[in-house]
Image (cartoon, helix red, strand yellow):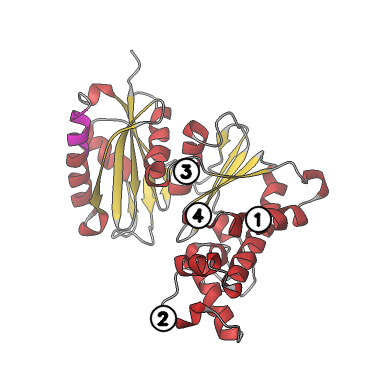
Amino acid sequence: MEKPYAIGIDIGGTNTVFGVVDKRGHIIGKNAIKTSLYPEANDYADYLAKSLDEIINTVGGKQYIKGIGIGAPNGNYFSGCIELPPNLPWKGVIPMAQMLTDRLNLPVSLTNDANAAAIGEMTYGAARGMKDFIVITLGTGVGGGIVANGQLIYGHDGFAGELGHITIHKNGRTCGCGRKGCLETYASATGVARTAREFLTERADTSVLRDLENITSENVYNAAIAGDALAQEVFAYTGQILGEAFANFIAFSSPEAIILFGGLTKAGALIMNPVKESMENNVMNIYKGKTKLLVSELKESDAAILGASALGWEIKEF
């Protein structure tokens, strides 16, 4: 009999969230641990395995688990390793999939968080039935997951799809990756706040944002909704840049849809309208009107678990 559950794990710099998921995408149970409390990867794996054992027992034991999927920063699908993670407590190359397999005696697969989001959309969300689409995650950074001909594109080394690190402005803003002018320095939540600060420095416009010491993307959104013209321009500028990037993405894989996921999508029409307009204005004529611009159908609080669990369903038995 086919096993009824998979486990999804999302490893973040502060928290690790995980849950047991059924075939329909219902989370049967979930929990979380503090990633940041474990400076040693082995200690982290020990505690995570213990916590997973507890949640596995609530659904009857390991005999009911098909597999475990992990989404992690710099996660390599081919090796099962987290490689040189910038925002995790551990340095170097961490063989996390094997570490959990050794502790739980269950098959484990690992990929980066944006790829996990793409698999989640294909399994449970807006991309069901699609064979060609791109997922863009808009959070603290910008991530990308590319699906073509029904398969996630990993590249020869497992790291394909780093769409947040295409160069938008040569010699532009400094990025955490060490380069300059990356898309995520403009189109992420932190990029929005950065744009607002630049506008305030360069211009004399009246804006409620001038009264704030540490501007966040949420501040910019609230100001824009309240009618602040400068804040609205920040979203228009961000949307224009994203749309130009999407026009380029369409040229290399001709996706049926580009699906946006993450906190920045909560800005709704403020961001989506300029993105769509800019995308259509910049795309080659043969692609005009062909690619849908969609927002993820996955509930944000559950999406990371669902995306990772979708990887668990793909695992072949030991």
In the image, what residue type sits under mark 2? Glu
Label pair 1/3, CB-CB below 8 angstroms = no
Label 4 Cα crowd, 10 Å radius (few <14 / some 14-19 / many 20+): some
Q: In front of the other: label 3 or label 2?
A: 2
**Residue 25 horizontal/vertical position (percent):** 40, 31
Q: Which of the marked residues, 4 or 1, is nearer the chain's N terminus? A: 4
For numbered disc 4, what is the local secondary structure?
A: helix
Label 1 Cα crowd, 10 Å radius (few <14 / some 14-19 / many 20+): some
**Residue 270 horizontal/vertical position (percent):** 59, 59
Q: In front of the other: label 1 or label 3?
A: 1
Q: Which of the marked residues, 1 or 2, is nearer the chain's N terminus? A: 2
Instruction: Count up the numbered dots.
Output: 4
Q: CA distance from mark 1 to mark 3?
A: 23 Å
Query: Which residue does the image show at 30% across and 46% down from the upper left?
Result: 17
Which of the 4 quarters of the picture holds residue 271? Answer: bottom right
**Residue 76 horizontal/vertical position (percent):** 43, 46
Please state, as top left, top right, bottom left or bottom right, where the C terminus lies in the image: top left
In the image, what residue type sits under mark 1? Asn
Q: Which of the marked residues, 4 or 3, is nearer the chain's N terminus? A: 3
Q: CA distance from mark 4 to mark 3?
A: 17 Å
Image: 9 above or below 34: above
Label pair 1/2, CB-CB below 8 angstroms = no
For numbered disc 3, what is the local secondary structure?
A: helix
In the image, what residue type sits under mark 4? Lys
Stretch of the chain drawn in magenta: 52-58
Mark 3 sits on what residue? 117
Query: Which residue does the image show at 29% across and 53% down from the upper left?
Result: 15
In the image, what residue type sits under mark 3? Ala
